[in-house]
Image (spheres, rainbow, N blue to C red):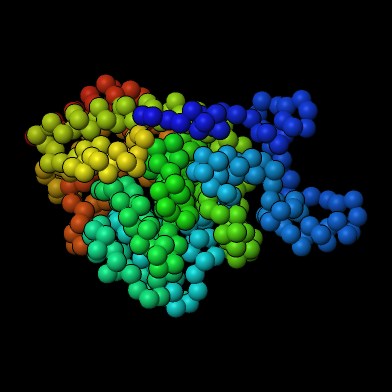
Amino acid sequence: MLIDPSDVAICVAGDEEIEAQGAAPTSTPIVQTSLFTFPNFQALVDGLGAEHRSHVYTRGRNPTVEAVERKLAALERGEACKCFGSGMAAISAVMLGLLRSGDHILFVNHTYGPTLQLAEHLSRFGIEHDLLLDLDVHAFEQALRPNTQLVWLESPGTMLFRVLDIPALTSVARERGIPTCVDNSWATPLCQKPLSLGADIVVHSCTKYLAGHSDLVAGAVISTSERIEEIFFRAFLLNGGILAPFDAWLLLRGLRTLPIRLRQHEADALRVARFLQGHPAVRRVFHPALTEDSQLVERQFSGYSGLLSFELVRGDFESVARFIDGLRRFRIGVSWGGVESLVISPNRGTNRLELEARGIPPGMVRLSIGLEGSDVLIDDLAGALDLLG
């Protein structure tokens, strides 16, 4: 993993605006307030006239939250950031803030399930969408419509972790005046910088690696100052999906250890992936480092996170459940990116046709590699795989 030293400095440093005021606390203060008062009525009127720049009400801006936003914008090399109370709140804000009835969204690659569920919901309001699983640039060009107003990319994609050629796709979209948004939660800004690859918007589920301790839920959108201002007024301020000051403080704490955590996640996940590759009960392993197009991966990533998946040879629900239940170190649960190792499968026992339609094998199991150590985790996986005979 090659982490930019400036990114490490951004993660670890204190808040410059607070430090500029004199003696500086090593930890950013929690401004736990619902509102801010003013010396006179005209000052309040002026603040209400520019809530995207003023402290009026924590549903708009809050100093602790702004400290996180400055860090995330700097890490992604963006002009501005807006944080939200969840990843889905951030995703919703992009769509609700930028789209209108009659517009079309093109999703490319396997996409986070609730994101697609939101798109289905938006169809009630005249916003259409398609999901493109063919990652070829020509197929992408053919899938764009005259009314496409947003291209949504995940790279690596959900579950199968296929990697997109982000510069090629964003170049086509930009020629047609279509903004592109990349969900960068898997890679984090330390391993991939979509804005530098041509994307217009980046979203994060900060719940995952950025926070890193499974103790908060948060999301973020990074883009130009102009676009973030548009999202602020059209989708943030009115919807109220705010990041609370205390959760912002927890996120700041998580960012301070992100570089060292991510290095260990990467190293242990690669060891686990290679172990699984050689096991007879495993058909194949899905991890960007194991893809055939290594040149594309090396161009876009400076490292990897700890989320991967694999396909069991025996893909029936009973075998998947027996394997998962046989694990002792891996906890069974949703989400990922924390210090604990987690396991889940998209196979619910009743959705085989749906999985086939999405190109996801029924024997798929997803692992989030925590910080317990690869030797311990490999021993646990070996024991559970032995249960399959």
Q: Residue furthest front?
A: 175
Q: In this rendering, would 259 be left or right of 81?
A: left
Say if 105 sits above or below 300 in the image.
below
| Residue 48 coordinates in the image, percent (x, y) | 77, 61
Which is more toward the observer, 277 or 315? 277
> Count of labels shown?
0
Q: Is residue 146 above or below residue 18?
A: below
Which residue is pictured at 83% across the width and 57% down the height? 44
State the residue lying farthest toward the right: 40
323 or 130, nearer to the observer: 130
Mark yes or no: residue 347 visible. Answer: yes
Q: Residue at x 71, y 26 (%)?
A: 25
Q: Is residue 119 visible?
A: no
Q: Quadrant of the N terminus?
A: top left
The answer to which image quadrant residue 338 occupies is: top left
| Horizontal arrangement in the rendering, residue 195 relative to residue 245 (left or right) | left
- From the image, which quarter does the C terminus lie in? top left
Q: Residue at x 75, y 51 (%)?
A: 55
Q: Is residue 309 left or right of residue 306?
A: left
Above or below: residue 379 compared with residue 245: above
Residue 133: x and y, percent? 25, 60
Where residue 312 sits in the image (x, y, percent)?
A: 15, 42
Pick the front one: 228 or 341: 228
Residue at 9% of width from left, 34% of height from top? 280
Image-quadrant location for residue 276: top left
Residue 302 point in image, percent of width and height:
36, 35
